[in-house]
Image (cartoon, grey):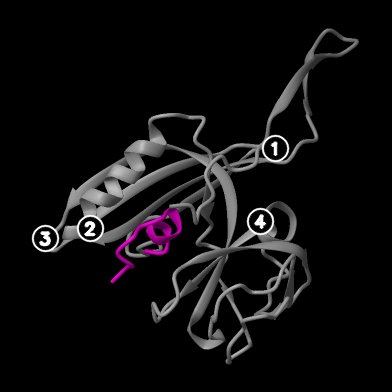
Amino acid sequence: MLPQKKTLADIFAYEHNWVQSYKFTYGYSTVIIRGRARNEQRKSMNIPPSRSVEMVFLTEYDQTTEVLNWLRYYQSSLEQVVQVPLYHEPIRTRIVSDMFGLSVVTTNDISYYKNLQDLSSDLLFIDKSWVQQPTVEAIASVQNDSITLTNFVSKHYVGRTTIIYPLMNAVITQHSIQHITDRWSSVRLFAQEVLDVSPVVGIGAS
């Protein structure tokens, strides 16, 4: 069960339902130039790719209305920039004990995580035992098997029950719901990255 008071972090902590499709795409912008032979050529604008993601997660029936109210609110204005976790780059820490107060988190091999290495500036910490609520920590630097945080880990996360995801700034462009059973609903969410913008609403904001 999620905590009673929901935040965006609580909603995204449901995590993607891998029985359903998960789509993550990069969009590279180009400019059209005209060459000397008067033929058109396309040239990269040399900016970071614009990313988009489609995810699906399950919610318990008595929590579905509250989750949908959140999503409707943030989708209603494309100026509501939020932080969306990238579930295809899960980070497992090699620390098995309490991480509270640490500034360096040792991890699995993350050298091939492009978003974490090059594009993300924040992380979502999720306690799979639900002793601690989800929280966001800022990244100072990333190595192949460790992450240095800007500040110390702010909550008592036990390494063996914690999973971490990189975040991206995005707007929620679309969502839908399907009632599966009397207890469970499936929520599909589409999000599009917003470049060079700080989140208007932090993922942990109430």
Q: What residue is rendered at 86% in x and 13% in y?
A: 35
Evaluate if marks 2 and 4 touch, with contact meaning CB atoms under 8 Å apart.
no
Secondary structure of the residue carrying numbered label 3: loop
Q: Which residue is mark 4?
A: 115
Residue 22 lies in what quarter of the image? bottom left
Q: Disc 3 versus disc 4: distance between alpha carbons?
A: 35 Å
Q: Position of residue 172 (x, y in %)?
A: 44, 39
Give the overall secondary structure of the magenta segment: loop
Q: Disc 4 versus disc 1: distance between alpha carbons?
A: 15 Å
Q: Which mark is residue 63?
A: 2
Q: Which residue is mark 3?
A: 181
Secondary structure of the residue carrying numbered label 2: helix
Q: Is residue 13 magenta?
A: yes
- Please indicate whether residue 138 sits to the left or right of residue 12 in the image: right
Q: What residue is rendered at 11% in x and 60% in y?
A: 181
Crowd rating for badge 1 (residues with CA inside 10 Å; few <14, some 14–19, many 20+): few
Secondary structure of the residue carrying numbered label 4: helix
